């Protein structure tokens, strides 16, 4: 494997870690209502499991409320069951053909737990990024030993330095995402 391919794969793996973290953070509750809290809740409907967002329109009419309007009103009870099963600590209320979720304010203790959870998610993303660095460095060492590639020590060292720069860049992104979300949780 040549050095450019190694770099590309490493950056791709790091980017995926950051994207996954972003997706996970949207599901973390702040005191404010957000469609991200329920969009990916799994709902058993029509004999298959689907994301809530594929079965209903999810909106935020007020800062402390989520409104779910099923595309097919017959799935309302399935949606309620899915939300209850997800363990979000929210109490769905059926209001005609729609479901309302009131978002209660967070207690101080719960805020601390959520911030700790967000930091844990950030650490997981960093571990994934560092694993991508480890794998890239292994591939670089293997490429150095491959006589067909004719790599100089400077090429190898330069590529390892580039991989390290990527790690710093993506870890910085993770840090800013985590601190942003933690601030959201603590200030609402």
Image (cartoon, rainbow, N blue to C red):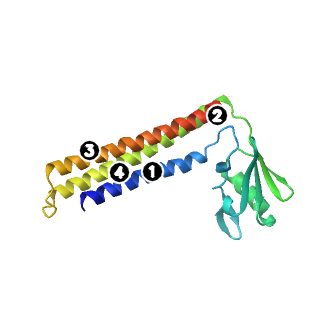
* Label pair 4/1, CB-CB below 8 angstroms: yes
Distance of mark 4 from mark 1, alpha carbons? 10 Å
Which one is closest to the eye, mark 2 or mark 3? 3
71 lies above or below 157: below
Q: Which of the two residues, 170 or 25, is positioned nearer the viewer here?
A: 170
* Label pair 1/2, CB-CB below 8 angstroms: no
* Dot label at residue 46: none
Distance of mark 3 from mark 1, alpha carbons? 20 Å
Which one is closest to the eye, mark 1 or mark 2? 1
From the image, which quarter does the C terminus lie in?
Answer: top right
184 lies above or below 76: above
Which one is closest to the eye, mark 3 or mark 1? 3
- x, y (%) of residue 129? 39, 47
Which one is closest to the eye, mark 4 or mark 3? 3
**Mark 2 Cα-neighbour bin, 10 Å: few <14, some 14–19, many ≥20:** few
Q: Give the farthest residue toward the top.
A: 108
Q: Which residue is mark 1?
A: 17
């Amino acid at each position: 494997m040549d050095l450019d391919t190694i770099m590309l794969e490493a950056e791709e793996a790091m980017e995926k870690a950051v994207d996954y973290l972003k997706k996970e953070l949207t599901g973390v509750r702040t005191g404010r209502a957000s469609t991200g809290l329920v969009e990916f809740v799994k709902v058993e409907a029509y004999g298959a499991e689907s994301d809530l967002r594929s079965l209903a329109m999810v909106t935020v009419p007020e800062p402390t409320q989520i409104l779910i309007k099923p595309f097919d009103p017959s799935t309302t009870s399935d949606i309620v069951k899915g939300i209850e099963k997800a363990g979000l600590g929210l109490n769905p209320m059926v209001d005609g053909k729609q479901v309302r979720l009131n978002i209660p304010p967070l207690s101080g203790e719960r805020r601390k737990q959520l911030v700790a959870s967000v930091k844990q998610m950030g650490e997981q993303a960093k571990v994934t990024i560092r694993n991508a660095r480890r794998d890239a460095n292994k591939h670089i060492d293997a490429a150095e030993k491959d006589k067909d590639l004719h790599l100089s020590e400077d090429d190898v060292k330069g590529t390892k330095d580039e991989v390290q720069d990527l790690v710093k860049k993506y870890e910085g992104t993770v840090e800013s995402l985590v601190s942003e979300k933690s601030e959201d949780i603590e200030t609402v």
